[in-house]
């Protein structure tokens, strides 16, 4: 028996321009079993077919559209989308034999596969499943990627996603305390395998790390990487001859950062400090001046209600850090919180009252993190680069 999701009369516009999410408040009735393993038909209140998608009967997002229009997707739509995602990365020049061997293979809605994120790290792959519909397809997904990797396959099903979406997370595959090894722009990195930070590393900042390293080399002076995780921005700058200091609260992350710097023969150019980026930061190693400041906090706003508090915390930290940047130097301010838009980053820079700055770059993730046009929630990473004038 099929499932049909019928919109309320007052649901508002639903279509490609509004993005692929249909929320519970827009739904009038669900006809049929509401099986996440099957495609569901979306209709307006008169019964006209608008789209087809994946249902989450217990989720606030009742339907995630995979295809707009009256025609149902073909029976093998999932395999077609997976093949298209792999082909798309190959067309971007992302290949196993290159200077970079880690990239995003599937980016959820951006690849028409809502609830599925897949990252490659060298020979290994990490699948993150965040919806009931993808959890119902886990065996098929695992078989697809196991046949396309020479290494290990990790499956991550976050407990928070299971609670939010109404499914029971399955056991992870190869969920031991392993490491993921990969190259990024010719540099060798290693990160803890899941369960760790997201899928292991922040691959969305890959191209930004190289750009910021080049800025640091051009302007002179040291680089301060606040929220350095396993050393990405600092190590890329060090590889171009820039002395770098990395700060992170996690001792485990800093241990990886030290080891990663040593792998590329850059240990002498890097210093590592354990501390809270939102604290006073009075360690002598953090004293200026620096040519480049990277401020890359974790997700500090999980909902719109958190924006004011998060913006205040960022402003306070920037007020302490920006005076340490030399004249003509750069501040790289990042947000991985979908609710913290670029305008919030600009406001934090102004409210920090730390001299005159101008924005020279407004960046996002690399092209292996595509976004469905109209899906505002898919544009989560903002990276603004400001220059001191």
Image: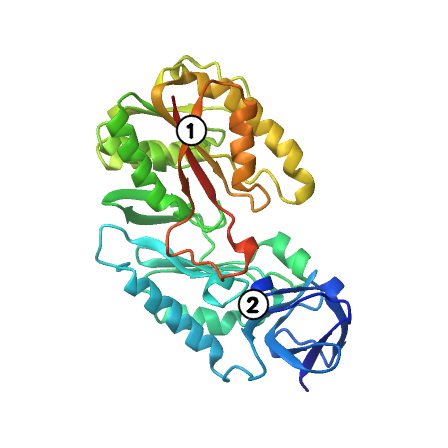
Instruction: Give residue 340's quadrant in the image.
Output: top right
Instruction: Give residue 164's quadrant in the image.
Output: bottom right
Distance between mark 2 and mark 1 Cα atoms: 35 Å
Disc 2 crowd, CA 10 A, few/some/many (<14, 14-19, 20+): some
Which residue is at the far bottom?
Answer: 1
| Secondary element at tag 2 | helix
- Against 206, residue 289 (above or below) is above
Measuring 57% from the left and 54% from the top, which residue is drawn there? 158
- 268 or 21: nearer the eye? 21
Which of the image's four quarters has the C terminus? top left
Mark 2 lies on residue: 16
Q: Position of residue 120 (x, y in %)?
A: 36, 57
Which of the image's four quarters has the N terminus? bottom right
Please state the total of marks drawn on the protein image: 2
Q: Position of residue 327 (x, y in %)?
A: 35, 18
Q: Which mark is residue 358?
A: 1
The answer to whether residue 293 is left or right of residue 18 is: left
Disc 1 crowd, CA 10 A, few/some/many (<14, 14-19, 20+): some
The answer to whether residue 26 is left or right of residue 286 is: right
Q: Earlier in the sequence, mark 2 or mark 1?
A: 2
- Against 231, residue 83 (above or below) is below
Measuring 56% from the left and 47% from the top, which residue is drawn there? 338
Q: Is residue 321 visible?
A: yes
């Amino acid at each position: 028996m099929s499932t049909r999701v019928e919109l309320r009369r007052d649901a508002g516009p639903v279509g490609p321009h509004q993005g692929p999410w249909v929320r519970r408040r827009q739904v009038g009735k669900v006809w049929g079993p509401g099986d996440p393993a099957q495609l569901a038909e979306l209709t307006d209140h008169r019964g006209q077919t608008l789209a087809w998608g994946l249902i989450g009967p217990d989720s606030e997002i009742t339907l995630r559209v995979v295809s707009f229009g009256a025609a149902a997707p073909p029976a093998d739509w999932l395999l077609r989308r997976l093949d298209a995602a792999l082909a798309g990365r190959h067309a971007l020049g992302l290949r196993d034999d290159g200077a970079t061997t880690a990239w995003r293979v599937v980016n959820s809605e951006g690849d028409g596969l809502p609830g599925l994120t897949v990252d490659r790290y060298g020979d290994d792959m990490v699948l993150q499943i965040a919806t009931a519909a993808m959890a119902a397809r886990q065996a098929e997904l695992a078989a697809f990627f196991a046949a396309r990797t020479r290494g290990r396959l990790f499956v991550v099903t976050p407990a928070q996603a299971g609670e939010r979406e109404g499914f029971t997370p399955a056991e992870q595959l190869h969920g031991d305390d392993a490491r993921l090894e990969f190259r990024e722009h010719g540099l060798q990195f290693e990160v803890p395998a899941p369960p760790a930070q997201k899928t292991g590393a922040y691959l969305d900042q890959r191209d930004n790390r190289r750009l910021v390293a080049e800025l640091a080399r051009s302007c002179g002076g040291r680089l301060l990487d606040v929220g350095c995780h396993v050393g990405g921005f600092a190590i890329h700058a060090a590889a171009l001859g820039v002395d770098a200091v990395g700060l992170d609260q996690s001792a485990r992350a800093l241990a990886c950062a030290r080891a990663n710097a040593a792998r590329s023969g850059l240990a002498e150019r890097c210093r590592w400090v354990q501390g809270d980026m939102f604290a006073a930061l009075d360690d002598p190693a953090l004293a200026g001046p620096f040519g480049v400041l990277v401020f890359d906090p974790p997700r500090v706003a999980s909902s719109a209600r958190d924006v004011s508090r998060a913006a205040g915390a960022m402003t306070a930290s920037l007020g302490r850090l920006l005076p340490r940047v030399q004249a003509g130097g750069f501040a790289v301010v990042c947000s991985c919180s979908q609710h913290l838009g670029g305008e919030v980053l600009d406001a934090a820079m102004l409210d920090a009252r730390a001299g005159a700055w101008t924005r020279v770059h407004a960046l996002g993730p690399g092209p292996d993190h595509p976004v469905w046009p109209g899906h505002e929630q898919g544009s989560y990473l903002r990276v603004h680069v400001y220059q001191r004038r």
